[in-house]
Amino acid sequence: MMGGLNRTVAPPVRALESMTLPAVSREVLANGTRFVVLNHGQQPVNRIMIVWPVGLADVESPEALKLLRVMLAEGTSHHSGAEIADTFEFNGAWFKVDSGRHFTSVTLHSLNSTAGKVMPLLGEIISTPSFDTLAMEGMRQKEAAACEIRRRKVAQQASELSGRMFYGENHPLAHVTTPGLIRNVDEADVRAIHRRLMLSVKPTVYLAGAVDEKLLQNVKGIVGQLDFSVTDSPLVRRIVPVRTHENSRCETTIDDSSMQTAIRLVLPSIDRSHSDYEMMRFSVFALGGYFGSRLMSNIREDKGYTYGINASIASLHEGASVAISCETDNRYASAVMEEIEREISRLAENPMGADEFEVVRSSIMSGLTAMLDSPFSIMDYHQMMDMFGLPPDYYAYQLEQLSALTAQKIMECAERYLVSAPRLTAMAGNPS
């Protein structure tokens, strides 16, 4: 037996030692770009992420922004889309463009050894995309077709209905992209979004990985020479607070052809500024945030009503909510709703047992630990703190809140914030 190791005996379980979120360095470049660096990790790889604080909820045409995302790497003033793709692939680099409610980002993963060959393309993609007419028409049709397929799914229909119910019909976050809206976007719309967002809003650059001096100066040289003040009408964030909900209600989108019903139950909640927010987040996790949660154990494992069901809490700039989502056979839609309410009540009426509480606590701790897994996940956390204006010690605060968590506090949060909250129930399908 190697080294006297007895494989019939389980290793001892130890509590995790104290964890610290690695710090980043910050500076502002001459062109006004905020530059954040994390030199962490042993592998010679890096990721540069350029983030503009404007997203889908801030523009007049979210569809134009979505087309901008897919068009950026389709060619620049000096390179075709094929040349860009070949350069990235040959040098082991990976590129993507993303946008959320209030952010737009360009991300490039690369090897330190070939970063000097791919970084200049990043500057070109941002500053001089060609927006080839033929390529844009192909992307427009592709995106419209994908949207049409996506909107046939009952889960998407329930999500759209839920957004209208929670935010209101005309709220930016309730906007629904349709194939027709995508097809109506023209080249001028995409160019305008690019000019007023990527060329006129100063971004934050996040560089993470094994950052040596050569890589650092290379990135500064590329990003620092870009002009982010092209127009005097830059796009700005558009925050519209969520309206107050006093009463519960249920709405259904009927799809006679569907064999399943998608359910999305939304409960208005407290946001990150509230002193109970982290405890509330832990309580929602216990309800439906992991595989062995209350909802999964009952509705999936015991009853077999659904393949999966989850609960999550989201604290946005506009407001916060708890969402419970699943898909089930049309026959079981009412039964699933009854079981959801039963589990909420059960969580609020009696403290969970010691074994279940330890599983919940350990699972949450594992999630916080996973954030320290790589320089990229660490930088993601710093970016999240920047996006929501959280203090630098927020990670330590979360650990403190977790150490103070008890089964009693989970029960109290469920009773205070879940039991009495209005229910906004969106269903899509053909519930019996």
Image (cartoon, rainbow, N blue to C red):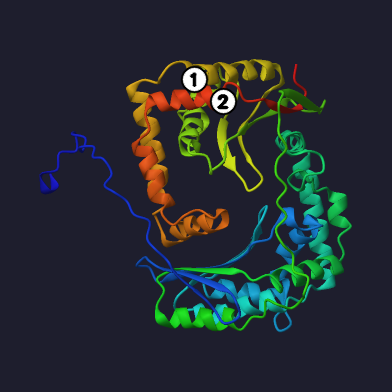
Amino acid at circle 1:
Ala
> Residue placed at 39% from the left, 39% from the top?
401
> Residue placed at 80% from the left, 66% from the top?
190
Q: Mark 1 packing: few (<14 Cα in 10 Å), some, or many (20+)?
A: many
- Look at the image and tell me in which quarter the N terminus lies: top left
Query: Circles 1 and 2: CB distance less than 8 Å?
Result: yes
Among the 4 quarters of the image, the one containing residue 167? top right
**Cα separation between marks 1 and 2:** 8 Å
> Is 353 situated left or right of 224 in this image?
left
Under circle 1, the secondary element is helix
N-term-proximal mark, 1 vs 2: 1
> Is 213 situated left or right of 12 in this image?
right
Badge 1 is on which residue?
348
Seen in the picture, residue 59 relative to 318 is either above or below; the reply is below
Residue 326 appears in the figure: yes
Badge 2 is on which residue?
418
